[in-house]
Amino acid sequence: MEEEIKNTEATNSSPNEETVEESVETTEEVKEEAPPKKKIKERRKKIDKEKDELIKANLDLKEKVLRITAEMQNIKRRSEIDLANAYKYDGFDLMVSILPILDNFERALSIKQEGTEKFLAGFKMIYDNLQSILLSKGVTEIECLHKEFDPNTMNAVMTDTNNDFANNIVLDCLQKGYMYQDKILRPAMVKVNERNVTQENDERNDE
């Protein structure tokens, strides 16, 4: 009888002990599976690093897009300017080639000999018509005689001294210069007054 009671107690106590043991084992497994704090910190650092790299890559991409957009706008603007200039200065080379013809007419008209009046009158008519056509196309003569020398529109090929004019004044135009719209078609070839600077200063002081 006592043996049966012992067996019954042993049987009743056995499942509880197994449950406790299983619980302990499960807790130990959870502890083993849970990642340590060091690994979590490293993983967070890696994620933060990748995030920073993505942000930097995104900023670089935006900068490239802006740079390419700016370059495209510049190309478009330059193309529009080139097209406008091509239209504005259309016929520039033709105008340059006509200038020597104009010079020859002026040389011919400057010759005054007896019996050539009627002949030169026809030349003068052609010359005037040619000048009118050039003027209608935007070709204008550069005014330089008795003007201050301008290196942007004139070439000084000779110098002289004339006390009646101030220093650096154009005394004579050896070859006419022309503008086409706002562009130099041909600079004027001129003779410039070159006076002694000391003498000119003395004259100014006397005044």
Image (tube, helix red, strand yellow):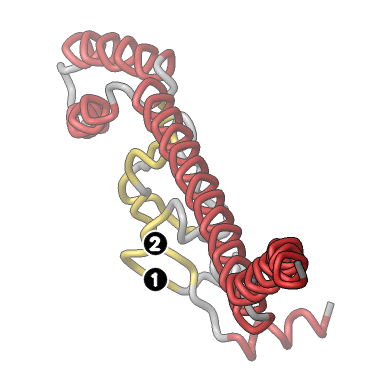
Q: Is the residue 173 above or below the residue 5 in the image?
A: above
Residue, disc 2:
191
104 left or right of 67 in image: left
Measuring from the top left, give residue 66's x and y in whole percent. Answer: 54, 46
Residue 159 - label: 1
Residue 166: x and y in percent read 62, 68
Q: Earlier in the sequence, mark 1 or mark 2?
A: 1
Cβ–Cβ under 8 Å for marks 1 and 2: yes
Judge by depth and name the residue closer to the eye, 110 or 97: 97
Q: Please state which of residues 99 and 67 is positioned toward the viewer in this rendering.
A: 67
Q: Quadrant of the N terminus?
A: bottom right
Indicate the quadrant containing the C terminus: top left, top right, bottom left or bottom right.
Answer: bottom right
Question: Where in the figure is residue 122, as x and y percent of width and height?
Answer: 22, 8
Amino acid type, residue under disc 2 in the picture: Lys
Mark 1 to mark 2 CA distance (whole Å): 5 Å
* Above or below for 109 versus 130: below
> Would residue 169 be found to the left or right of residue 111 on screen?
right
**Residue 137 visible in the snapshot:** yes
Disc 2 secondary structure class: strand
Give how far across and how far down residue 81 sits, in percent: 45, 32
Residue at image position (47%, 58%) is 171
Q: Amino acid at mark 1?
A: Thr
Give residue 150's mark: none
Q: Residues within 10 Å of mark 1 (few under 14, many from 20)?
A: some
Image-quadrant location for residue 172:
bottom left
Asked if residue 23 can be seen in this view, the reply is: no
